[in-house]
Amino acid sequence: MILGAERKIASWHMLVAIVALSIGTLFGPLQALEHMGINLYPALQSVGLQSYYQGLTLHGVLNALVWTTFFITGFFTLTVTYTLKKALVYPMLSWAAFIVMVVGLVMAAIPLLLNMASVLYTLYPPMQAPWFYYLGLTLVVVGSWMSGWSLLLTWAAWRKENKGATTPFIALGSLITVVLWQICTLGIAAEILVMLLPWSLGLLPGVDAQLARTLFWFTGHPLVYFWLLPAYVSWYGMLPKQAGGKLFSEPLARLAFWLFLLLSTPLGFHHQYVDPGISEGWKYLHAILTFSVFFPSMLTAFTVTASLETAGRARGAKGLLDWILKLPWNEPSFTAQAVAMIIFAFGGIGGIINASYNVNLVIHNTAWVPGHLHLTVGTGVTLTFIGILYWLLPHLTGKALWGTGWARAQSWLWLVGMGLMSNGLHRLGLLGAPRRTMLGVATDNYGTPDWLFPRLETGIGGTILLVSFICFLVVVVKTMMNKETAKVEMPIAEALQPEGIPAWLNNWQPWLVGTVVLIVIAYGPVLVSLISQVQLVSPGFNVWK
């Protein structure tokens, strides 16, 4: 099936995403080496990189926000249209969305590169950036909304032409993620448009940091699922096909996505356990809701593993675990995603500690948190997206993937590098090392000798990750220059059993109503209280200069 405009739109999104990841990743090893005691930032001032915190902000914004958002909007443009077998009904809306996102990216990038907006990717006021930085980020989000509207309008037209038909699973999972994004970004939109943007323009006397943090985390945690669910679309709907098997249970896969929509947003207070101004009762409610996400997560772990087991047995496995060895580990796209899933499992286990009301106090605001984030977003998401690119680049360009050995080595190097770096950060966190801190400097002031080995571990791991990423870039560039052609189709896994899909798993209404009701219950009273007592008193600070 050829969808010309959709391929072009997706290709441009991927180009921006890969460029952003390439620049952002350069700063990661700088952080890791600094933790090890090798501070390269003073030597880089001559090329415009002024401080550790400028590098940290660039790393976070480019990797966590730009790379993911552009990849996801481009990927979904393909998954929705390809599986619905329908072209975009308003392709100009998707092009306009892309242009708005790029304009916003440029507006945000200028103050970042000039060290005028080193407020970290969490934006935390009262640190203050220029107004055009906030406006640029807003345009990136608005553009992603427009991209989602284009996909939803296309699905609505498909529904009109196919009354009573069940939406294909990959399209449904993609659209649920789009809707989750539209809902959860209302928090950060309110924070920027009502508070930060007028504040940075001098229209407000100050900012209420507590209200701003609460609005940010309304978006901040479901943002993780906006990153993760596209990976789940691939793990559920594509990876079994790539492994030679089938999707173990399509109804379970659909249920998991609906539960993520229902439960992902009303749980942001578990990032604010130590914040004043929010009572223990509301924090406890959010703790329960955070643990409730455990259920769709376990559905995913069971269903994806069972799907891969069917693939291994279809390849001749007979014993209890030999199906693992039968899987196609020689295929780069499969290997990258399988390694991503293995590492992500440890991130999920650590997430239970983050969510616990009491244990969280041990690791809150320590180096444990970036250690956790690099297992989940830094690997579960990013390495899966890299694995998808190993089939998507040939699909979009018609060129054969260059260097499958390099691509496989890239995944295993990532496993080693991330294992070392994340373990080092987790151990530093348990030893009380703070996050968002130059640990190389902090050690001389209030660190302990116990920090030494995990600091070395972090630096070595970050360096190996850089080598892994260089392998990825070599594969991408050589593939684009490859004269050998290939015709690669999107892998779509069939269901193992032709099961009927219950109507309640194909009906948006109860899930959307439940999502809104749960958000109102979990956030409504607290937001009303914070807004009624708002104190716009804090001036802006540029603490990084």
Image (tube, rainbow, N blue to C red):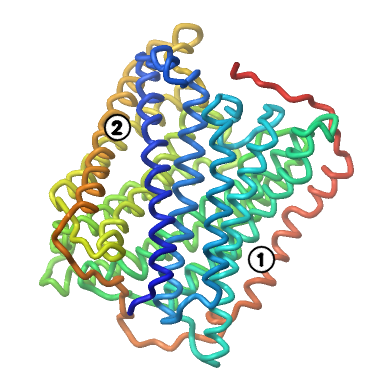
Find disc 2 in the rendering and name its residue.
Answer: 420
Q: Is residue 267 above or below residue 499?
A: above
Q: Is residue 443 above or below residue 485?
A: above
* Frontmost residue, 368 versus 531: 531
* Frontmost residue, 168 versus 65: 65
Residue depicted at 36% across the width and 54% down the height: 385
Residue 450 visible in the current orientation: no
Residue 81 visible in the current orientation: yes
Q: Is residue 62 above or below residue 302?
A: above
Q: Earlier in the sequence, mark 1 or mark 2?
A: 2
> Horizontal placement of 241 versus 38: left or right?
left
Q: Quadrant of residue 196?
A: top right
Q: Residue furthest top?
A: 444
Residue 86, percent from left and from top? 45, 81
Figure quadrant of the N terminus: bottom left
Residue 320, percent from left and from top? 17, 64
Q: CA distance from mark 1 to mark 2?
A: 39 Å
Q: Amino acid at mark 1?
A: Thr
Q: How many marks?
A: 2
Residue depicted at 69% across the width and 38% down the height: 213
Residue depicted at 55% across the width and 25% down the height: 114
* Frontmost residue, 447 versus 154: 154
Badge 1 local density, few (<14 within 10 Å), some, or many (20+)? many
Figure quadrant of the C terminus: top right
Residue 121, percent from left and from top? 56, 36
Q: Quadrant of residue 399?
A: bottom left
Q: Amino acid at mark 2?
A: Leu
Q: Secondary structure at mark 1?
A: helix
Find disc 1 in the rendering and name its residue.
Answer: 515
* Frontmost residue, 179 versus 274: 179
